Amino acid sequence: MGKEMTNNTSGENYKLAVHGLTRIYEDADRQVTALKDVDLFVRESEFVMIVGPSGCGKTTLINIIGGLDHATEGQVLLDGHPVSSPGADRGMVFQGYSLFPWLTVRKNVEFGLKMKGVPAAERAEKARKYIELVGLAGFENALPRQLSGGMKQRVAIARTLANEPEVLLMDEPFGALDAQTRVVMQELLAEISRCTRTTILFITHDIDEAVLLGDRIYVMSRRPGTIRDVLTVDIPGERTHNSLVLPEFLAAKKRIMDMLWQESNDAALGR
């Protein structure tokens, strides 16, 4: 696992670039700085993870990138163009599945395409493709209430991928799943990433998940959230549950654990 300087863009054209992002919330009584001078870069087809202490601004950051919140300072660039509002070029998957309970799996996956006016035959073909990709062939006509939590999240991922976003933004998508289902979903997402080469930015509090899935990992400090370090993950072979015991995996995990422990310890001691 190597280290990459957070401010080193090397003149490279990044798919997604965040420059000097600061977010300050103000009300009548106080001012809270959630993020301070955050720089973050994601290459085409790269799988990038963000980890950090609770309350460090991870969700605020991804909401700003997705256009659901705005920065006080700084900017977000997608393919070199500023973004400040939601758009079909950024697909978002949250911990909550947000499925329409009255629609079947196929109709849920087709929903965004229908809203964009995609013809019925094309919608059906894309839905079939992505339902198969997430391993739900045979469940096309099932309703969400007939599905497990992991299956519902598969539908949510298929629905987002069917719209073919430039960047997939994921905010703790597996946080509500039990441990075994979570590992299955992690392996599925790793396979989807290999198959589709989709650019992914993924927030998690789970260090194992970050190391298992990420090409690079941004480690954030406690609030106000800044980028403490950027780590490159070097794990041989395909990422599966077997990777969890590899020396490279354990070394990466310990390095991140040490950083997050230091953040928590400094906070407890008021440093």
Image (spheres, rainbow, N blue to C red):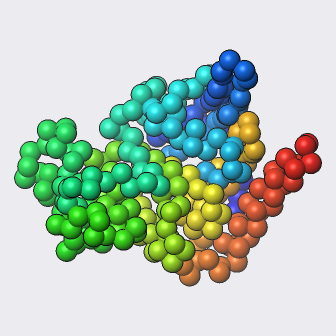
Task: Report the residue at 14% width, 38% height from top.
Answer: 117
The image quadrant of residue 260 is bottom right
Q: Quadrant of the N terminus?
A: bottom right
Task: Report the residue at 67% width, 34% height from top.
Answer: 35
Q: Is residue 124 left or right of residue 223?
A: left
Examine the rendered structure and indicate whether residue 187 appears above or below residue 49.
below
Examine the rendered structure and indicate whether residue 233 appears above or below residue 34.
below
Looking at the picture, tell me which residue is in the foreground, 125 or 55: 55
Q: Which residue extends farthest top?
A: 28
The image quadrant of residue 157 is bottom left
The image quadrant of residue 158 is bottom left
Q: Is residue 182 left or right of residue 85?
A: right
Can residue 95 be seen in the rendering of this structure? yes
Examine the rendered structure and indicate whether residue 236 appears above or below residue 30.
below
Looking at the picture, tell me which residue is in the foreground, 79 or 141: 141
Q: Percent position (x, y) of residue 179?
A: 54, 74
Q: Is residue 222 left or right of residue 14?
A: right
Q: Is residue 39 left or right of residue 13?
A: right
Task: Report the residue at 40% width, 67% height from top.
Answer: 149
